Amino acid sequence: MEIKSAEFVISNTDVKKCPAGDLPEYAFIGRSNVGKSSLINMLTAKKGLAMTSQKPGKTLLINHFLINKDWYLVDLPGYGFAQRGKEGRQNIQRIIEDYILEREQLTNLFVLIDSRHEPQKIDLEFMEWLGENGVPFAIIFTKIDKISKGKLKENLDHYTKTMLETWEGLPPILLSSSEKKEGRDEILDYIDEITKSLAE
């Protein structure tokens, strides 16, 4: 898929204020500092589309970007940022849960996971919650350029083994490096495939 246009549409904290219409939405979520904004900028080939920051936990809103006039890329707040305080965390959790459970246009959720780390309880619990609620999702392992190929394979094997302890099958798994622009075609082709199947 070629991205010809990517434009920011709206930011808000209320799912009811998300754009009207029935265009499919592909949302991106992950723990704070997983490289979500960098990935969105890499996918759209627009450097400043999503705000990147050295400080984790900058995305506090639901951000809609209209891609090629025919689907939305949705940037969701990161989960699990400890320094935000209990009330802040609960507020972010409410925003995330309301969007994921109530937004009918949500077609697929991409859960971003830092490929350098062992399976994290917060990610596993979040994906379990998605499974329990029947939310279609795929995993994108980020920052694959920051780790050796051997260690990457080891970490992915560990992750899949851990998930298969509670899952019957695994969701689609994609790999990416925003710096090296790896995984871009695979992620966009995956979106394109789903969008085309919806139109049939």
Image (cartoon, rainbow, N blue to C red):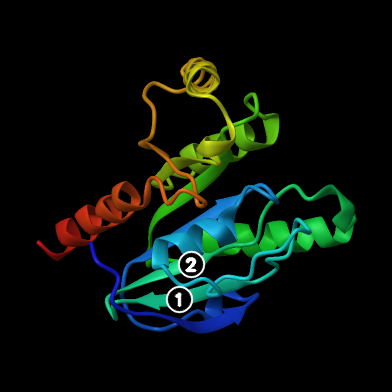
Question: Relative to residue 169, is residue 93 drawn left or right?
Answer: right
Q: Residue at x 47, y 38 (%)?
A: 131
Which residue matches tag 1? Answer: 65
Q: Quadrant of the C terminus?
A: bottom left
Q: Position of residue 47 (x, y in %)?
A: 52, 71
Q: What amino acid type should be assigned to the residue bearing mark 1?
A: Phe
Quarter location, residue 94: bottom right
Q: Residue at x 68, y 66 (%)?
A: 59
Q: Position of residue 80 (x, y in %)?
A: 74, 47
Which residue matches tag 2? Answer: 74
Q: Residue at x 63, y 47 (%)?
A: 34
Real-space Cα separation, disc 2 to disc 1, in angstroms: 6 Å
CB under 8 Å between discs 2 and 1 = yes
Q: What amino acid type should be assigned to the residue bearing mark 2?
A: Val
Q: Is 58 placed above or below 166 here? A: below
Observer-nearest residue: 43 or 9?
Answer: 43
Badge 1 density bin: few <14, some 14–19, many ≥20, Cα 10 Å = many
Q: Work out whether residue 18 can be spotted.
A: yes
Question: Relative to residue 142, is residue 52 drawn left or right?
Answer: right
